[in-house]
Image: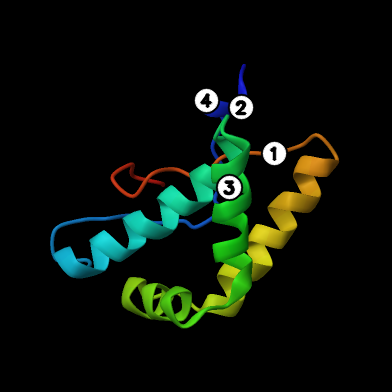
Amino acid sequence: MGRASKHSNFFKVEVRQGNMSAENQIFVAILHQAIRDAFISSDGFARRTARAWLLGNSERFQFVCECAGREASYVQQKVKQKIKEEKNGNINLPPMPWQRVH
């Protein structure tokens, strides 16, 4: 089983009608794409850029987290944890926002 088919509860997100606004869903999708870029992109530049953005704590990152309903410090803690797991050869990918996690 390849890396792209594994899922974890990293960023458990269940998007349902009425659960979160369309605007919130967009910002959750932005975070998910950054995480996917940071861990599965075959483009080294994209991986480095995504990781720098996720860990850099910029105003834009803070804004996206706030709009997604996530604590920036929590997101960064989980990203750091996944980087550590990746170095140990044990990485699971987050589900995309439209995938239901039970």
Residue, disc 2: 3
Q: Position of residue 101 (x, y in %)?
A: 40, 46
Choose the circle earlier in sequence order: 3 or 2.
2
Amino acid at pointer 4: Ser
From the viewer's perspective, is residue 16 above or below residue 5? below
Q: Is residue 16 left or right of residue 38?
A: left
Q: Are marks 2 and 4 in contact (CB under 8 Å)?
A: yes
Q: Residues within 10 Å of mark 4 (few under 14, many from 20)?
A: few
Give the secondary structure at mark 2: helix
The residue positioned 76% from the left and 37% from the top of the image is 90
Q: Are marks 1 and 2 in contact (CB under 8 Å)?
A: yes
**Cα distance in 3D space between marks 3 and 2:** 13 Å
Q: Quadrant of the N terminus?
A: top right
The residue sitting at the top extreme is 1
Residue, disc 3: 38
Decide which of 5, 101 is in the foreground and name it: 5
Labels 3, 1: front one: 3
Q: Position of residue 57 (x, y in %)?
A: 58, 77
**Cα distance in 3D space between marks 2 and 4:** 6 Å
**Image disc number at residue 5:** 4
**Cα distance in 3D space between marks 3 and 4:** 16 Å
Q: Is residue 81 left or right of residue 54?
A: right
User: Does the image show residue 46?
Assistant: yes
**Cα distance in 3D space between marks 4 and 1:** 11 Å
Give the secondary structure at mark 1: loop
Residue, disc 1: 91
The residue positioned 46% from the left and 73% from the top of the image is 61
Give the secondary structure at mark 4: helix
Give the secondary structure at mark 3: helix
Decide which of 79, 41 is in the foreground and name it: 41
